[in-house]
Image (tube, rainbow, N blue to C red):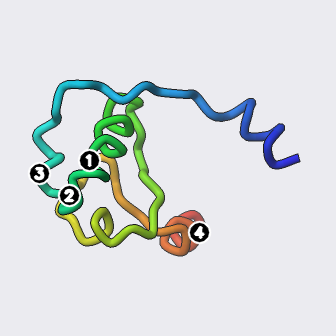
Amino acid sequence: MFIRRILFTVEPVSTPVSLHDSENAIRDIIDRPILRAAIKAGADILLTGDKDFTESSVVNPKIMTAAQFISHRE
């Protein structure tokens, strides 16, 4: 059921080759393409538990843990 629901709501986005300025705020260079793809997709929120994201200074998209997201929506 979960996979079926995801297939109707997820939009695959390729990772852009060119770098984005805000990537420098992410410590782990391996994580940077994830931010780049989120920016290209126009994501409002990036959900993650990865401290390289949550402890960064990135403001767009907003970086949130799942717990923060749930309490944000209530």
Question: Counting other residues with Cα less than 10 Å from the Cα at mark 3, is it few (<14), some (14-19), or many (20 or more)?
Answer: some
Q: Residue furthest right?
A: 1
Residue type indicated by callout 1: Arg
Q: Where is residue 63 in the image (x, y as percent from the top left)?
A: 36, 59
When the figure is inspected, residue 64 is found, relative to residue 58, above or below; the finding is below
When the figure is inspected, residue 7 is found, relative to residue 28, above or below; the finding is above
Q: Do the residues labelled 1 and 2 touch (CB within 8 Å)?
A: yes
Q: Are marks 2 and 3 in contact (CB under 8 Å)?
A: yes
Q: Which residue lies furthest to the front in this view?
A: 30
Is tag 1's residue or tag 4's residue first in the polypeptide sequence? 1
Residue type indicated by callout 3: Asn
Q: In which quarter of the image is residue 48?
A: bottom left
Q: For this view, does 45 lie left or right of residue 35?
A: right
Is tag 3's residue or tag 4's residue first in the polypeptide sequence? 3
Is tag 1's residue or tag 3's residue first in the polypeptide sequence? 3
Residue designated by label 3: 24
Residue designated by label 4: 70
Q: Position of residue 59 (x, y in %)?
A: 24, 54
Q: Quadrant of residue 41?
A: top left
Which label is found at residue 10?
A: none
Q: Residue at x 33, y 47 (%)?
A: 61
Which label is found at residue 32?
A: 1
Q: Distance between the residues labelled 2 and 3?
A: 5 Å
